Amino acid sequence: MALALLCCRAGALGADSGKTLIELQQRFVDLKFGMFIHFNIPTFMDHDWADPDASPALFNPARMDCGQWAAAAVSARMTYGCLTAKHHSGFCIWDTKTTPYNVMNSPFGRDVVKEYTDAFRKEGLKTMLYYSILDTHHKLRPGYVAREHVEMVKSQLTELLSGYGEIDALIIDGWDAPWSRISYEDVPFGEIYRLVKRLQPGCLAMDLNAAKYPAEFLFYTDVKSYEQGAGQHLSKESNQLPALSCLPLNGSWFWKSDFPATPVKDPVMLVKDNLEPFNRSYCNFILNVAPNRDGLIDDNALAALRKIGELWNGDGESGPLPACDAPVVSANIAKHKPARSSWSNDMWIMDFGNDDNFHTAWRSNPEVEIPWYEIDFPQEETFNAIMVYDARQSIRRYRIAYEQDGKWNVLFSGENDKRVKIHRFDRIRGCKVKIIIEQYTAPPSIAEFGVYDEWR
């Protein structure tokens, strides 16, 4: 007999905070506009990626005034800030006990995260933090990741989410990106996600690289993020997910010596082409403003922010978010496991269906009437969710089954015309998982087949 599928909507997570996940996502979308603040040791090097061996002695913003940053955000009608607590070179701008590579061992010797959170809250602004998983100073990079690195990440996030009051969102970078090559298995995403939710159930965990996944579903993030400079662009016409789009006011993220004399982006363009249409599309816009080496925002940036505040009044509802499923945050245990299938079309054999690449796919040969695709685990696995990414959105009716002790058991039998077909159920054990496709509008093409043991 088929197992009863659980209705695990986005509303089921985050309940311990007093708000469901969909309520937290709605609150984030309704914030509409915020200030990204790239300020760290790269500020003093004229490069966005700092030398990982740069001395803490470089960091000395002698006139730093986070109150000026907050006032500038208010002038633009922003509602929150997000500060780079740690960027890719690993320098920590808070009083951390995890590493001597931090601001307290610089000539500045003050906790920037504390001064930032205090200043922004004084102006009634929400506070968020940016944190990089990639850490070149501590050799948290491909080929070197060890368990002590994971423990360092957990300790640092524990400090940030325990010692600075309410943090509304954590924007995480340097994870599962082509330029970082640190997978969600190297530093386990589910483990870090659970830690964030335990420390602050109301904090959204947002992976800045989540745009590599299909736009119809949330994979490894509470909010779909789009970095425009990396070629990631939200569809203003079709987006149905809580989203974030980011762009720097200047030509790059961290301050450069030519910034004071170089024109910033046009405030009219930022409002008309970004802020207003994004807000109508369930998307929050975060504009990066880079403080200089004195720790102050340049005059040309201050003027642009004031102009934005004049052009945009902050009115208008974002509208209620459409219902969406809870994000996938666990590792895909089917990734790169042995796969079998009915006759494939041309070169697109079964191995493309679980290669962790949504741009390749297993394709069924048009001659096959009832195609099937199967994952064979080397040993019995425990799981409670299955995802099928139907690349052509052509699969209409199908069955999903699993094998246990030599017997096949049906998990689902029915119709589902979504591109991302997610099934959640009570935890089971099995050595094989299979989809049998009974009705379709074009030869099926499965870009990814995911099997997960989710934390709930």
Image (spheres, helix red, strand yellow):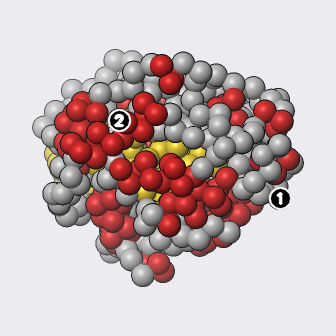
Look at 35% across and 50% down and name the residue there. Answer: 75
User: How many tags in the picture?
Assistant: 2
Q: Amino acid at mark 2?
A: Ala
Along the line of sight, which residue is nearer the eye, 272 or 456? 272
Relative placement, left or right, of 338 versus 271 is: right
Relative placement, left or right, of 331 versus 390 is: right
Image position, residue 125 (x, y; %): 43, 62
Image position, residue 69 (x, y; %): 50, 49
Along the line of sight, which residue is nearer the eye, 201 or 337? 201
Disc 2 is placed on an element classified as: helix
Look at 73% across and 47% down and name the residue there. Answer: 92
Vertical side of 398 occupied by 311: above or below: above
On residue 304, which mark appears? 2
Q: Amino acid at mark 1?
A: Lys
- Earlier residue among tags 1 and 2: 1
Q: Is residue 374 visible?
A: no
Q: Can you identify the residue that label 1 sits on?
A: 97
Image position, residue 363 (x, y; %): 32, 29
Vertical side of 237 occupied by 410: above or below: below
On residue 359, which mark appears? none
Q: Quadrant of the N terminus?
A: bottom left
Q: Nearer the viewer, mark 1 or mark 2?
A: 2
Q: Are marks 1 and 2 in contact (CB under 8 Å)?
A: no
Look at 42% across and 30% down and name the residue there. Answer: 300
Circle 1 packing at 10 Å, graded few (<14), some (14-19), many (20+), is few
Disc 1 is placed on an element classified as: loop
Image position, residue 264 (x, y; %): 39, 26
Along the line of sight, which residue is nearer the eye, 382 or 204? 204
Q: Can you tell which quarter of the image residue 262 is in?
A: top left
Vertical side of 419 occupied by 423: above or below: below
Circle 2 packing at 10 Å, graded few (<14), some (14-19), many (20+), is many
Look at 16% across and 33% down and name the residue there. Answer: 442
